[in-house]
Amino acid sequence: MSLFSLRPAKRPLRRVVLLGATSAIAEQVARRLVAQGASLYCVGRQPQKLDALLDDLNVRAGSAQRIDGSCADLTDSARHAELIDAAEQHLGGIDAVLIAHGTLPDQQACSADANTALEQINTNALSVISLLTHLANRLEQQQHGVIAVIGSVAGDRGRQSNYVYGAAKGMVAIFLQGLRNRLAGANVAVVTIKPGFVDTPMTAGLNKGGPLWATPERVAQGIVRAMHKGANVVYLPWFWRPIMLIIKHIPEALFKRMSL
Ligand SMILES: NC(=O)c1ccc[n+]([C@@H]2O[C@H](COP(=O)([O-])OP(=O)(O)OC[C@H]3O[C@@H](n4cnc5c(N)ncnc54)[C@H](OP(=O)(O)O)[C@@H]3O)[C@@H](O)[C@H]2O)c1
């Protein structure tokens, strides 16, 4: 906190690791961070998509900024420590991390087959928890940093149309609550990002348009702001906070009869 202002100082985002960097939202976050002078280490699953992202970011970056990355399927938790080592070495330290990867499952397929449900829980929750465990220990040791994770409003309440995805995002949100509590004394901010509907490839199968839909650019702006602030839980856009407050408080006796 500055002596002259009640506003907390902005957390520096100079050396940032993006996991799931080729996601439409993460790509916009990357562009904003590069425009602010950050160096980035980007992890994406598909080599072609990752190369295209890195080429684009390198064109935007100044000569003092370092932009690099590597390919990984993030469900391969055996590689997590090695990936974080590579990021740390490349950047010369880590100020912040954004975990962005995820999949939007077909709920009917998950309902029909337990293995499909478990695969989705693995991608959207267990792989994230593994990464968070490695990252938390490192950032706790260095006594500074920001850990941000893209969750979802879907994690606030289970609904028949997507409760496997919602359960995974909800698990991560509870894990982050505990981690935030643990790391508060170590000067490490833990930021839970809860977007609503965002127009990205993930939602290609949904009917888009209308006031509840946001662009990845708008959501990315909110993510970067929240990371600088070291915010706790952020709904993006902001109007999802009151919407979810209402949805969370609908009595179960009524909620179970609703078609959501
Ligand atoms: N779009 C929305 O409405 C919305 C709303 C709330 C929350 N979110 C969350 O926002 C985050 C970003 O999603 P998005 O909307 O930007 O969608 P997106 O463009 O489809 O991005 C999803 C990314 O996750 C990556 N991914 C999936 N499984 C992976 C794995 N096993 N290993 C490594 N990478 C993997 C995908 O890689 P590939 O390119 O290789 O497939 C893709 O880059 C996700 O966590 C999502 O749940 C999205």
Image (cartoon, rainbow, N blue to C red):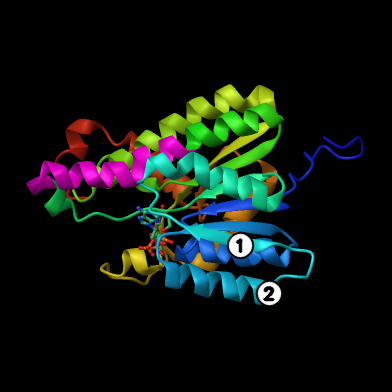
Amino acid at pointer 1? Asp
Q: Main secondary structure of the magenta part?
A: helix
The residue pinned by badge 1 equals 68
Decide if residue 63 is on the left or right side of residue 158.
right
Which numbered disc, 1 or 2, marks the residue that appears first in the sequence? 2
The stretch drawn in magenta includes residue 30: no
Q: Give the camera-side residue of 146 and 214.
A: 146
The stretch drawn in magenta includes residue 124: yes
Give the image location of residue 148, x and y in percent: 55, 44
Whether disc 2's CB lies below 8 Å from ligand 1 is answered no
The residue pinned by badge 2 equals 60
Decide if residue 77 is on the left or right side of residue 116.
right
Which quadrant of the figure shows ligand 1? bottom left
Q: Give the camera-side residue of 82 and 259.
A: 82
Q: Quadrant of the N terminus?
A: top right
SS class, disc 1: strand
Q: Looking at the picture, does residue 38 appear above or below residue 244?
A: below
How far apart are labels 1 and 2 at the CA level? Answer: 13 Å
- Disc sitting over residue 83 in the figure: none
Determine the residue positioned at 40% across, 65% down.
Answer: 46
Amino acid at pointer 2? Arg
- Can see residue 215? no
The magenta stretch is 111-131
